[in-house]
Each structure stands twice: as structure tokens, then as C-alpha cells.
Amino acid sequence: MVEREVGKVGAMLPVHAVEVGTEPLDGPMRNSVGGWPFLDDGQEWPECFCGERMALFFQLDIPPDVEIFGGDHLLVFHCRAHNDASEPVSAGGRLVPRYWDAPQPPYPRPFWRVLLQRHAVLPAAEAEPSVRALPLTLRPLMDTLNSRGLGAQTFKVGGTPSWAQDPEYYRCACGADLVYVCQVPEGMEFAVHPGQPEQAYSIRADTYWLFLGNEVYLLACPAHCDPAAVWPANQN
């Protein structure tokens, strides 16, 4: 595996901090928490195995200077009703075919969907109904490595992951080594609209979590073999 691909020399790689604004959005924005998802033509809003439409937690345009994925539009969906951690289904570090749809015991399919869209031009007609729509701003960040060679523990795109435990490396079912692209910090809260159903295991009734509030490291296929070829590694 090439070190540059897994972020071990992240001090030399472009990295952008992702900041969440406070003023609610009243219209579509490509960089947002919640809001109107920008999906490729023919890409449907993902549904959970339970039949419920997944909530859009956030979306953003990956800056052009982030290698491999620069210019892609990243969207992270997660079922409101199912709040759990991801468990890789692999053999020898190689994820199973169509791992984004594969069983996630005890569930018959995953309760999340992460997409890298390459031609997302127009927003969906409807906004995400549960997660409050807030703007995201991306700013260049100095991702100085600590004594363990880990990057900053923050919401960011690019750079070096701040692995809370041992680093995780996976090979896509297509044969390509997955590459780190984005990180969501542990315990990040996503505000919800008043009156929305409470999420199981969340910290408060007005807040949703991704993957039980674990730190999330998004590892994507550099070959872009499928828009959903992204694995969300969870640690705490």
C-alpha cells in the first residue's frame, strides 16, 4: 500500500477544516449540514432497509487540491431510526462485493449511505426534513502531526486521520486500496427540527448522531468504481 494514499504523510497533503455555521439555510447550498442534497441524475435519495428515507447529515464539495477526490461532491446519509456502529464485512482486508449494500449484522443491509457524486448539478426538490439545514465553510488547515503521526482531531477533508485506535486499511471489492478522504470528530451533534422523532441512543432529544457518535473516517475507492464505494470506519 502506498503511504501517500493512506495519509501517513498528511503534513504534506492539502487539508481543509469544515466549520458549521449557525444561521439556518432558507435555500439549497452545496456545502451544508442537512439541506437539499445535490445528487447525480438517476441517483435516488437513499433508503434504509427499514423502508425509511435516510437523513442527509451533511454534504460538501471536496476542494480541487485534495488529490483523487477533488471536485467530487460528498454526501453522508444515515438512518434516523437506526443508530449503530459500522462493522466491516471483509476477507483478508478486502471488502465484500457491493459492501455498501451488504448485510450489516444484525441488519440485512447497511443503515447508511455515503456517496461521491461527480456530476451533481441540481439540488433535490425537497430539503432534508429532520436535520436542521446549516451552512458549511471549508478553510485551509495546518494539519500538524502529533508524536504518533496523527493529524488533527476535527471535522476535516484531506490531510491525515487522527485514528483513535489502530489505523484501519481496507481494499475495495474492485481491488483498489481505499483512501482516506474525510473525518467527522467523536461526539459531533447534528441539530434536528422541533417535533422530529428522537433518535435511539442519542445524547438529547433535539440532537442526532452519526454511528453512535463515534469518530468517523471515510475511506473511498480511488478508482470511483461506484458512487457508493466509501467505507465509514468507526472508532472511539
Image: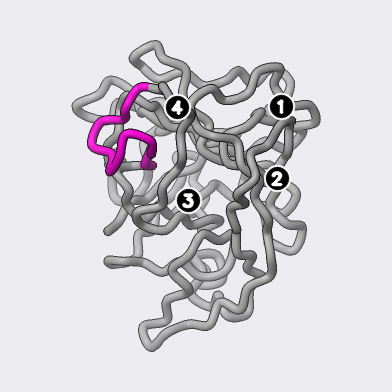
Chain-order first, disc 3 or disc 4: 4
Q: Residue at x 35, y 22 (%)?
A: 197
Q: Quadrant of the C terminus?
A: bottom left
> Which x, y percent locates residue 84?
27, 37
Q: Is residue 204 magenta?
A: yes
What distance separates the C-alpha of mark 4 from that of mark 1?
30 Å
Q: Which residue is mark 2?
A: 72
Q: Residue at x 57, y 20 (%)?
A: 45
Q: Which residue is mark 1?
A: 40
Do tag 2 and tag 1 residues touch (Cβ < 8 Å)?
A: no
Do tag 3 and tag 1 residues touch (Cβ < 8 Å)?
A: no
Q: Residue at x 75, y 32 (%)?
A: 120
In this image, 125 relative to 161: left or right? right
What distance separates the C-alpha of mark 4 from that of mark 2?
32 Å
Residue 218: give its label: 3
| Amino acid identity at mark 4 | Pro
| Chain part drawn in magenta | 197-210
Viewer-nearest residue: 145 or 97: 145
Viewer-nearest residue: 173 or 122: 122
Viewer-nearest residue: 92 or 102: 102
What distance separates the C-alpha of mark 2 from that of mark 3?
14 Å
Residue 101: give its label: none
| Amino acid identity at mark 1 | Asp
| Amino acid identity at mark 3 | Leu
Q: Main secondary structure of the magenta part?
A: loop
What distance separates the C-alpha of mark 2 from that of mark 1?
11 Å
